[in-house]
Image (tube, rainbow, N blue to C red):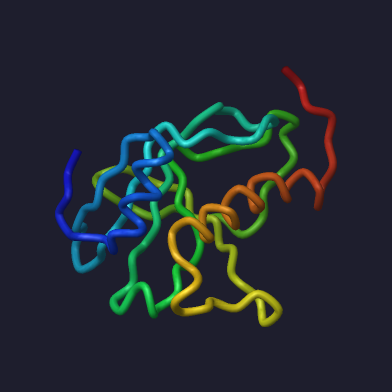
Amino acid sequence: MRRQFQLPEDDVHFLESLGLPWETINDGNMQWLLIHNYPISNGYNFNDVSVALKIETGYPRAALDMVYVYPPLQRTDRKGINALCLQHIDQKMYQRWSRHRTAANPWRPGIDDISTHKSLIDFWFENEFIKVPHAITT
C-alpha cells in the first residue's frame, strides 16, 4: 500500500487497529487517505467500499470534512440519497457525500481525528435510513 505522506502517529495506530488496508496518496495538489474494504450498513448495493478522506493542509488542527466512496453507493430500495456528486480521485470516480459537522458538533482540535471522523461517516451511512426509512431487502 502506498504511503505518499505521513499521518500523525495516533491516526496510524487507529487505522492499523481497523485491520483494513489503507494508504495515503497525493493526487494533484490534494492529499487523500484511502481506506479499502470499508464495511457498509445494510441497505446499500455494496457490503464494503473504499472510502477517501481529504487530508487538509494543517490537519489535525484543520478539520476533516465529508466522505468520498468508491464504488458509488445506491440504496437497494432505490430511494435517492441527497447531496452527492462525483469526484475524481486516484483515477477513479468516487461519490462525494456532502456531509458536514454542525455548530453543535464542531471540529475540536486536539480531540478530533480520523477515529472521530470515522464515527461520523458510519452515522452518515446509517442516518440515510433514519431520514428516509425503508424496508431492507436482502
x 48%, y 56%: residue: 115
Taking the image as shown, residue 26 lies to the left or right of residue 47, namely: left
The mark total stands at 0
- Residue 64: x percent and y percent? 45, 68
For the N terminus, the quadrant is top left
Q: Position of residue 69 (x, y in %)?
A: 46, 45
Which residue is located at x 53 percent, y 33 percent?
A: 39
In the image, 128: left or right of 4? right
Expressed as whole percent of the image width and height from the top left, the position of residue 53 reads 40, 57
Occupied quadrant, residue 51? top left
* Residue drawn 45% across the image and 52% down it: 68
Q: Position of residue 24 (x, y in %)?
A: 24, 52
What's the residue at 15%, 54% (across, down)?
Answer: 4
Q: Is residue 4 above or below residue 75?
A: below
Of the 4 image quadrants, the one containing the C terminus is top right
Residue furthest out toward the top: 138
Q: Is residue 51 above or below residue 101?
A: above
Compared to residue 29, the image places residue 130 above or below, namely above
- The image quarter containing residue 18 is top left
